[in-house]
Image (tube, rainbow, N blue to C red):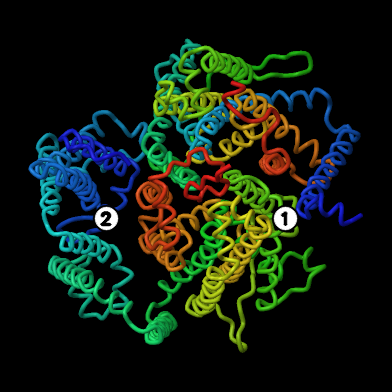
Amino acid sequence: MFANLRRKYDFTDVLLWLIGGILLIFILYGSIVTLTSGKYTTAQWLNFIVFGLAQGGIYALIALGYTMVYGILGMINFAHGEFFMLGTFGAFFMAEALSATGLLESNWVISILLMLAAAMIVSATVAILAERIAYRPLRRAPRLVPLITAIGVSYFLQYTARGLFGSGVEAFPNVPALAGSIAVGPIKIQNTQVAVFIATAVLLLLLWLFVSKTKVGRAIRSVAEDKDAAALMGVDVDRTIAISFAVGGIMAGAAGVMYGLVFRQVAFYMGFVPGLKAFTAAVLGGIGNLAGAVLGGLILGVIESVGPSLFLEGIGIPAPHQLKDGIAFTVLVLILIFRPTGILGERLSKRA
Amino acid sequence: MQKAKPFRLMDAVRLGLFGGIAAVLIALVGMIEAFNKREVINGVISMSQVMLMAVAFVSAFFAAAQAHKSKPGQTIPAGLIAGAIVGVLVAILALAIVPLNMREVFVNATPRLAKILMPQGMEGIAGAAVLVVGAALVGLLAAVLTYLPGLLRRSILISLVAVVLLALLKDVLLPVIPEGLGDFLYASNGLTLVGAVTSFIVVALIAYFWMRVRPSTSKRIAAMPPAQRRTMSFVVTISFLIVLFLLPAVLGSYLSEVSDLVGFYIIMALGLNVVVGFAGLLDLGYVAFFAIGAYTMAVLTTPELPLVRGYIPQLSFWVALPISVGMALLAGIFLGVPVLKTRGDYLAIITLGFGEIIRLLVLSDALKPGLGGAQGVTGVARPVLGGIVSDTPQEFYYFILISILIAWFITSRLKKSRLGRAWMAVREDEDVAAAMSINLVGYKLLAFATGAALAGLSGAFFGSKLGSMVPASFNVLVSINVLAVLIVGGMGSLPGVVVGAIVLIGLPELLREFNEFRWWVYGIVLVVMMLYRPEGLWPDATRERELLDFEDEPNVDSEDPTGLAPSATIPS
């Protein structure tokens, strides 16, 4: 009887399910204890979720860049978090200039549009340059080679930002029009969070229209499906790849503006952790899948904001919010182990 | 690779622009200003000038070399143009810094930088003109150099680099070399003019003759009977070891400190070499095992942490050492099982995630009673041998050296063993390896565990040497550091690891101004190595063949999880 079982399940499988099971029990136990203790009111939980969704919207925007590049090149673009960071710096300097001229206070809509433009231009330019200089010559190299190159690009960009803009944390200028908050029933939503929701929704709609309705979008999907066949059909593969890097950069730039508005700070190292989390989001939703990236981002944002209070506090871990990032990375590890194809499955081409 | 197009002067312009942008970036990042205090030749030329000239030189050299290949007549103009364009961009920067108030955005664009970029004591248009002319002259020099025969050109280039290094390493070398030589070579800041010229000539001559003699010598060695060759390599190894053992007596305390650090990285890199180089598993969370080794050593031997002491008695270094290595090994297996089931590049991310989780756990208040939290642990035991406590860097040097030798022995034996061949098979093609009845997970796990154990060994010594432990020393940068060492040296190659560690860990430690920019330079180094020399500086023979193969055979779409196989297409 055991021999039969042994044949069916490898020792490593058993160990894996054991780890997963233990974690699940901890999570359930912690949640039940927290919920029954009634430490947080429903309104507080809803506020956690709203905060998580705003955070998740930012992750989703960054995750789109990972997913597009992975869908097309099958490569993890490690440097994508740095594109986001540089975009935030672009928005930051634009915001500084705007606040110096007073436009930031008198006309906030135009200000934010200008900040978006600056961030998107910076991120997209860096993304295109990185693709052109570092990744394109390696298109036919063994898989480890572009991955290591991407790590190199990431460190180069990070420390270029440190050298150019200094090693300190800079405070993002305040946008007075977005200072307050609105109340929806028991929930308090910051105006900046509302701005993030609206902007994210609009950008996603535009991206969806771009990928599914335009000619360039069709080219992107065809290259993701089969590069050689696409080339035979007259698609300029190199140009299409550059465009998808640029689109990823634009989304990362937008995420940078959102980040600046919500968290009000910029620093050279800020790309790494959000980048890793956005990658987690992309994998969670199914890498290569645009809808999946968005879904993954939102789910991860919520898990991360609810998780420390819900899972950890119940177990009795002191200062659970220190382990917020740990929860996100645990989600990454668990997803990669148990469902590497993500919630919605892979492929950019099939589900645009 | 595309077929070489005929050279056009536009290519020289492009290279010049590229170099110019690089020079501007170097200036804005702050490197030029940081190195300005260093003189290469006292009173003649400073390191920041050398850096700018080197950029102009390199772009002009590439432009001239390209021209030389297809249109020899355009060699000189190509060099001149490329050099001049670098000069123009630098001059524009120097002129623009103050009027445009660039400091608002770029923290390093100070008026001082503008002054440094200009030739000494000049300003405005005149200074800019001199700058452009000077850069063009450097370009001309580079172009002339392409006309020289290869051997001579190479020895001149080597010698130029060596002189700059000699000047930079003054503070390190001065206490070590005889006084007379020191007075001859060095002035108060940098080399003396006579010393620089002499050392340039001497190094160039040595390099020239060495490169001339080497092919015939290696042929002669290859022609020796095997027994004689074995004796010779034995004698060379032994004398090398003797030198290594005598080294700390000469080096003094500071240099021993640096060699200890290099040693920690050599052990770690030898371990990661097994994981990445042999088995082809890109592990970016390698620092986790280093941390586990160090923390096990710390927690077991410190008199602090009363909570832990309630359960485990305080141990001595020698008892804790094997436990630390064992803990790292166990962690390697425990983390390895889930991790190794995932696909190729996910492995990199998942290990990165694990490394971060470990760091966050160590930092958290939750585990503070056991691990000391953000304040860390102090009072870690030192190795005691025959009643003597080793706490100087020189004494540690021997422990580290012995550990390196053990690690070297183990990994070099593993490489040639059945196990090593199995790893390489897994690296090259998982499917084929599995078809050869190689148990993929088992072999990967062994590689992972070996690497983890070596990292734990390094960590245990590291913890003991520092005497105190803070979580900040175990961030992801350490993993990237080790990876860079491996890439520069040559993945899979053992001597390469040592070369890489000396270049990437030792040099930045000796050049304090450089330390701030090391990550920036590492990023560039990783990209450049991958683009132009993926096999590393001291490549492993098999590896080199593999990596150089890829240019002929496309394998973009092959579902090859390790990513190292040179396009193995399996007929279906």
Look at the numbered disc 2 and give the secondary structure of its residue.
loop
| Residue B436 spot, x, y in % from top left | 62, 58
Residue at which label 2 appears:
B37
Look at the numbered disc 1 and give the secondary structure of its residue.
helix
Please state which of residues A322 and A102 is positioned toward the viewer in this rendering: A322
Q: Mark 2, residues whose alpha carbon is within 10 Å: few (<14), some, or many (≥20)?
A: some
Q: Mark 1, residues whose alpha carbon is within 10 Å: few (<14), some, or many (≥20)?
A: some
The correct choice, above or below, for B147 with respect to B16 in the image is below
Does the image show residue B94? no
Q: How many marks?
A: 2
| Residue B518 spot, x, y in % from top left | 41, 53
Residue in the picture at 22% in, 48% down: B58
Image quadrant where residue A334 sits: top right
Residue at which label 1 appears:
B368
In the rendered structure, are the residues bearing label 1 and label 2 in contact, judged by CB atoms less than 8 Å apart?
no
Residue in the picture at 56% in, 80% down: B390
Please state which of residues A62 and A103 is positioned toward the viewer in this rendering: A62
The Cα atoms of the two marked residues, 1 and 2, are separated by: 44 Å
- Relative horizontal placement of residue B435, taking residue B543 as reference (left or right): right
- Relative horizontal placement of residue B336, taking residue A21 as reference (left or right): left
Please state which of residues A58 and B66 is positioned toward the viewer in this rendering: B66
- Quadrant of the rendering where the N terminus of chain B is positioned: top left
Instruction: Tell me which amino acid carries mark 2.
Output: Lys
| Residue B399 spot, x, y in % from top left | 54, 78
Image quadrant where residue B384 sits: bottom right
Please state which of residues A44 and B490 is positioned toward the viewer in this rendering: B490
Instruction: Tell me which amino acid carries mark 1.
Output: Lys
Q: Are marks 1 and 2 on the same chain?
A: yes
Identify the mark nearer the N-term, 1 or 2.
Answer: 2
